[in-house]
Amino acid sequence: MRYFRQFSHNVTLLGGGAASAQTVSACLSLAPDLVAVDGGADRALELGHVPQVVTGDMDSVSDAARARIDADRFVETPDQNHTDFHKALQVIDAPLVLGVGFMGKRLDHELACYNTLVRLPEKRVILVGEVDICCHLSGPLTLSLPIGTRFSLFPMAPVTVRATGLVWPVDDLPMSPWATIGTSNETKATAVTVQADGPGLLVILPRVHLAGAIAALAPPDR
């Protein structure tokens, strides 16, 4: 992409949805490079943070925010065939992205973000909400979690899933959005493994396990 930006550290990508100061601060402690998506620039400034990059179609960012952020930090992506979240992930390259401000508020926007997770499986992204986190399963995953942790699997496409360490067995189980899903399962072991035979499976966990999810998804040294 013409405006490609590369980061050596994990990135916090801040959108215009629900994002408390505590959640943003928690994400920045784990992903210190801040990129704002459109109106997320205003939210960043409200919280005392100046984003390193602001991207999107710029229909929501205020004139006041533009005045406070250096012009060379703005990367405008006017393509209306993709959401600003989708375009932001294409603009930046980072070991892992924490997307905050994309869950909550408008349901249609939130659903579009889950669609993007599946459409860009090569990106390591965790959406961070006030209650839960969500990521796309792009390959076999092993997580260390306390016994009794809520562990949900939601298919965005037909997939066959195998998992270990869960109370309700998932053993070569066909799942699809219009048939069997795997929400509200629970861990019965401290190590949980999950894999699917193709793209399209979302993993949903309580937000308290964000650091563990980051460790599990971390790429090899680049």
Image: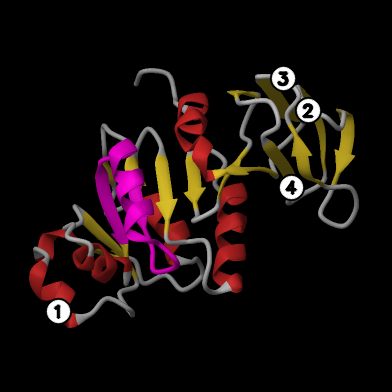
Q: Earlier in the sequence, mark 3 or mark 1?
A: 1
Residue 36 is situated, as x and y percent measured from the top left of the image, at 29, 60
Q: Is residue 178 magenta?
A: no
The residue indicated by pointer 2 is: 166
In terms of image quadrants, where is residue 206? Answer: top right
Residue 184 is situated, as x and y percent measured from the top left of the image, at 77, 45
Residue 100 in the image: above or below residue 39? above
**Magenta stretch in the rendered image:** 12-36
Secondary structure category for the residue under label 2: loop
Residue at x-position 48% and y-position 50%: 128
Residue 57 is situated, as x and y percent measured from the top left of the image, at 34, 72
Q: Nearer the viewer, mark 3 or mark 1?
A: 3
Q: Earlier in the sequence, mark 2 or mark 1?
A: 1
The residue indicated by pointer 3 is: 189
Residue 158 is situated, as x and y percent measured from the top left of the image, at 82, 46
Residue at x-position 17% and y-position 73%: 65
The residue indicated by pointer 4 is: 154
Tags 3 and 2 in contact by the CB under 8 Å rule? no
In terms of image quadrants, where is residue 11? Answer: top left
Q: Is residue 34 magenta?
A: yes
Q: Amino acid at mark 1?
A: Ala
Q: Nearer the viewer, mark 2 or mark 4?
A: 2
Residue 156 in the image: above or below residue 145? below
How far apart are the two marked residues, 3 and 1, measured between alpha carbons?
Answer: 51 Å
